Image (spheres, rainbow, N blue to C red):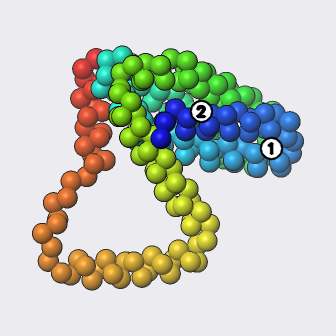
Amino acid sequence: MDPFELLKTDHRKVEQLFSQLESASGKRKLEVFKQIKTELELHTQIEEKIFYPALEEPEETHDLALEAYEEHAVVKDLLKQLGRARTANDQWEAQAKVLQENVEHHVEEEENELIEKAQAALGEEELEELGDRMEAEKARKQRGSSSKKSGATKKSASKTKSASTAAKRARPSKKGTSKSSGSKKSRSKKSAAKKR
Ligand SMILES: [Fe+2]
């Protein structure tokens, strides 16, 4: 799958939600915000887990990728602060506006600069593979968040799961040394940052 199609679809969805936020009032405003928060969190997680790490290595995209992480950090911080509010007062509105402006800037940079450079830096095959992984990760996360909503079902399911995990642990296994791709990724992130 084309990773840029996936990103652009997410971007358009968030833009639409922001315009809904502008016209909403009262409780509805917080409801729309909640949707924005969910969308942005999912989107940033996928980019940070799959897309940006692949862009850190090539020289052409290295700086933009690091900048994107920083922009995400600002957005996530604003989402957290806005998410704590019980009413959308004037200060909340101001902060929501800053969030929107930050997201718009980030989207613009991603679509006008990063995508073009990523296309030049990575081969078509690698991009396709990235897109497939991003799509799969998004589906996995969406399934995860929808099963969270049905708490009771999950509880009993996890009980069964932990029982079988315990049984597995009791048996000696040679598979104990499986490597974690997560820590490997964060290591490569650090080494890429050092290269600067
Ligand atoms: Fe992003």
Does residue 102 show up? no
Is 34 rendered above or below residue 126? below
Is 59 rendered above or below residue 128? above
Does residue 35 show up? yes
Assign a secondary structure to mark 2.
helix
Cβ–Cβ under 8 Å for marks 2 and 1:
no
- The residue under label 2 is 8
- The residue under label 1 is 29
- Label 1 CA crowd tier, 10 Å (few <14, some 14–19, many 20+): some
- The disc placed on residue 9 is none
Q: Residue at x 42, y 23 (%)?
A: 119
Residue 126 at x, y = what percent?
35, 34
Relative to 169, is 129 on the left or the right? right
Q: Quadrant of residue 132?
A: top left
Q: Residue at x 17, y 65 (%)?
A: 176
Kind of residue sitting beneath label 2: Lys
Q: Residue at x 51, y 77 (%)?
A: 155
- Label 2 CA crowd tier, 10 Å (few <14, some 14–19, many 20+): some
Kind of residue sitting beneath label 1: Lys
Mark closest to the chain's N terminus, 2 or 1: 2
Between 195 and 4, the one nearer to me in the picture: 4
Residue 108 at x, y = what percent?
60, 21
Residue 196 at x, y = what percent?
28, 17
Relative to 112, is 104 on the left or the right? right
CA gap, disc 2 to disc 1? Answer: 24 Å
